[in-house]
């Protein structure tokens, strides 16, 4: 009998994942990761994924299923590996994806370590993705419900982690998951999905950063592509490439953030056409489908979570970086975000965007 540790957030997905693993005959243990203190984020208990109500929801499902349940305190790890990276990225003028860091350093690293300590064979989560074995490789694949697919934020999984991870929801549609929860009498069956960064539930990341750090970020120049000053920005942490809202600049045509120069505390604006580019570079690349990638390959590349992957040529380099050249220009490719490569429904690998030719 396989013994599994189930990451339970208190939401419907992880609750149904726990039920399905028990139905498969697994020896199940439930756990919630305490990731941060709400008072550090300046938010009320009811608004975060680590709230007391979420813990109680998870505990209630575990009791209903008759499985042991624990709360693991990973607040120190979360601060170092997620919040500090998040703040540092915005201070450097890049746009982070904290969910990827949380998966990489917490859910599939620290939680896996804890699973080993209590004798579990695998970690189970409520992610919508699939894992399959093909020859000597473990492959990460899209969920059957592509509208809920989360493979993009899972590209950093290693072969060892894939071998010891289970995604029971990857073959289900969300409507099926809610029906299962209803049938089991789970009172979170219709609990809304979380939409925001868990420690920034109101979406105002700049307010969070200023409150968390106690810093005020200096104003600086908004300039055009020739360096002419158009106005003043309110601190670079408030901006990302492609942004139009909140610039406070009057112009003949709409202007957007084109480039953020943290060293000079300056933001370059341009018209929409100037945001399009064909080439990006990425580093820290994790290849899933290959032990070593070919010298060149064709793939479809996705540059943000809600982006539809687009055909491109991929050139891996010996230092672990890649150059990706799209067949058609893409809008607002943003440093700090992930680029993930697909072959059909299979994730080839992914890394962090470091720059473009724009």
Image (spheres, rainbow, N blue to C red):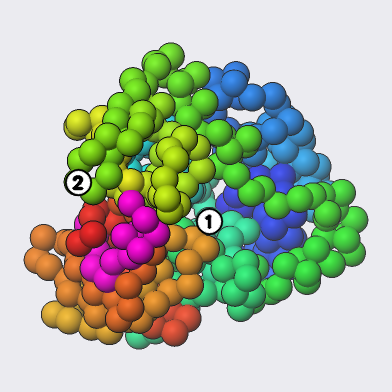
Confirm whether the magenta stretch covers residue 267: no
Res 226 label: 2
Residue 163, position in %: x, y? 43, 67
Residue 320, position in %: x, y? 16, 61
N-term mark: 2 or 1: 1
Residue 116, position in %: x, y? 46, 49
Is residue 179 visible in this depiction of the protein?
A: yes
Category of crowding for the residue at label 2, using alpha-carbon neighbours closer than 10 angstroms: few (below 14), some (14–19), many (at least 20): few
For image coordinates 69% across by 24% down, the residue present is 44
Category of crowding for the residue at label 1, using alpha-carbon neighbours closer than 10 angstroms: few (below 14), some (14–19), many (at least 20): many
Residue 340, located in which quarter of the rendered image?
bottom left
Which of these two is toward me, 289 or 218?
Answer: 218
Number of numbered discs: 2
With 23 as the anchor, is 82 left or right in this view?
Answer: left
The boundaries of the magenta stretch are: 270-289
Res 123 label: 1
Confirm whether the magenta stretch covers residue 281: yes
Which numbered mark, 2 or 1, is in the foreground of this view?
Answer: 2
With 322 as the anchor, is 84 left or right in this view?
Answer: right
User: Predominant secondary structure in magenta?
Assistant: strand
Q: Is residue 173 above or below residue 335?
A: below
User: In the rendered view of the protein, which quadrant contains the N terminus?
Assistant: bottom right
Which of these two is toward me, 242 or 248?
Answer: 248
């Amino acid at each position: 009998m396989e013994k599994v540790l189930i990451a339970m957030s208190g939401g419907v997905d992880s609750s149904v994942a726990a039920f399905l693993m028990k139905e498969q005959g697994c020896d199940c243990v439930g756990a919630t990761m305490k990731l941060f203190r709400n008072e550090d984020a300046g938010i009320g208990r009811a608004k975060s994924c680590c709230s007391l109500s979420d813990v109680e929801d998870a505990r209630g499902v575990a009791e209903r299923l008759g499985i042991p349940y624990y709360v693991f305190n990973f607040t120190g790890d979360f601060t170092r590996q997620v919040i500090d990276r998040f703040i540092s990225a915005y201070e450097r003028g890049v746009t982070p994806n904290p969910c990827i860091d949380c998966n990489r350093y917490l859910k599939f690293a620290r939680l896996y370590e804890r699973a080993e300590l209590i004798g579990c064979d695998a970690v189970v989560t409520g992610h919508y993705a699939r894992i399959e074995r093909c020859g000597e490789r473990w492959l990460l694949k899209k969920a059957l419900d592509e509208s809920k697919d989360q493979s993009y934020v899972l590209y950093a999984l290693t072969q060892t982690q894939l071998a010891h991870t289970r995604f029971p929801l990857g073959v289900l549609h969300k409507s099926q998951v809610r029906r299962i929860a209803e049938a089991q009498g789970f009172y979170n069956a219709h609990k809304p999905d979380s939409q925001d960064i868990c420690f920034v539930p109101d979406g105002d990341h700049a307010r969070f950063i200023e409150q968390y750090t106690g810093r005020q970020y200096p104003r600086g120049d908004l300039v055009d592509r020739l360096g002419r000053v158009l106005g003043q920005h309110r601190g670079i942490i408030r901006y990302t490439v492609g942004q139009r809202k909140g610039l406070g600049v009057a112009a003949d045509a709409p202007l957007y953030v084109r480039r953020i120069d943290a060293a000079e505390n300056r933001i370059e604006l341009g018209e929409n056409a100037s945001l399009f580019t064909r080439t990006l570079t990425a580093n820290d690349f994790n290849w899933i489908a290959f032990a070593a990638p070919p010298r060149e390959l064709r793939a479809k590349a996705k540059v943000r979570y809600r982006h539809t992957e687009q055909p491109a040529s991929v050139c891996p380099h010996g230092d672990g970086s890649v150059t990706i050249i799209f067949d058609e220009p893409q809008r607002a490719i943003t440093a700090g975000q992930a680029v993930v490569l697909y072959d059909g429904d299979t994730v080839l690998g992914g890394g962090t965007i470091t720059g473009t030719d724009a």
